[in-house]
Each structure stands twice: as structure tokens, then as C-alpha cells.
Image: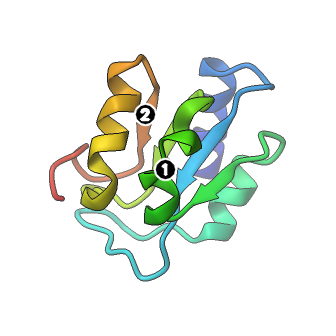
Amino acid sequence: MRTLIAALLLIASPAFARVVVFWQDNFPTVASQPIARTALVQALDGLDPIFASIDGLRDPATLAAADLLVLPNGSAVPTDAWSVIQQYLRAGGNLLVIGGQALRVR
């Protein structure tokens, strides 16, 4: 899984891309297996990802310069930050949902 994520990011993003990963301790994973934060750190090695909590995602500045937002919780989506995520996507932002069905459960 780590190799697949890294390969997708290298193909889709230049080395200077800014990657934001949603990470909230105890956030549920739905329709997928949970991914350890250490696995994400290893998969994104060299990209210097920013790990943002729900509070971080609520701040539009967190995604303002992001090239990629990663949601690693399968079908679960952080609804408290949904309006900012929508704005980011509507402005042309990129989204990687790991596992589950994208944006199905909020």
C-alpha cells in the first residue's frame, strides 16, 4: 500500500508539491482498514506532508497552498471541515481518499 501511495504521488505531483494529510486521533475508519500514521509518513517520505486535525482543516489557510489533500480514513469524512474541503476542491484542489468509497460517510 505504501508503495502504491508513493507512486501515485510521484506521478501526479512534482517534488515540491504541498501535501496535507487529515489526521485526527481516534477518528473512525469506515469500509477500510485503518492506516497507521507511521505508514503515511513513510509513504510520503520526501514530500514533507503536513498532518492537519479537524481544527486545522477548518482553517482555509491550511489548504490554501496545498496541491493534494489526503483523507486516509476510508469512507469517513471530517464533516466539521466539509465546507472548507469543498471550497478547496471547487478551486481545483486534488484529493486522495485511501480505502472505502470516497466521500460516502460523514
What x and y, as percent, mark residue 29? Answer: 32, 69
Quarter the C terminus occupies? bottom left
- What residue did someone put label 2 on? 95
Secondary structure of the residue carrying tag 1 is loop
State if disc 1 and disc 2 touch (CB < 8 Å): no
Q: Position of residue 62 (x, y in %)?
A: 57, 45
Of residues 76 and 78, the one drawn nearer to the viewer in this rendering: 78
Instruction: Give the numbered dot on residue 23.
Output: none
Q: Quadrant of residue 20?
A: top right
Q: Residues within 10 Å of mark 1 (few under 14, many from 20)?
A: some
Q: Residue at x 80, y 25 (%)?
A: 15
Q: Is residue 81 left or right of residue 26?
A: left
Residue beneath label 1, please? 59
Amino acid type assigned to the residue bearing label 1 in the image: Asp
The mark lying in front, picked from 2 and 1, is 1
The answer to whether 3 is drawn above or below residue 65 in the figure is: below
| Depth check, front residue: 10 or 60 | 60
Q: CA distance from mark 2 to mark 1?
A: 17 Å
First along the sequence among labels 2 and 1: 1
Is residue 39 visible in this depiction of the protein?
yes
Question: How many marks overall?
Answer: 2
Residue at figure coordinates x 36%, y 27% from the top left: 89
Q: Relative to residue 98, is residue 39 depicted above or below?
A: below
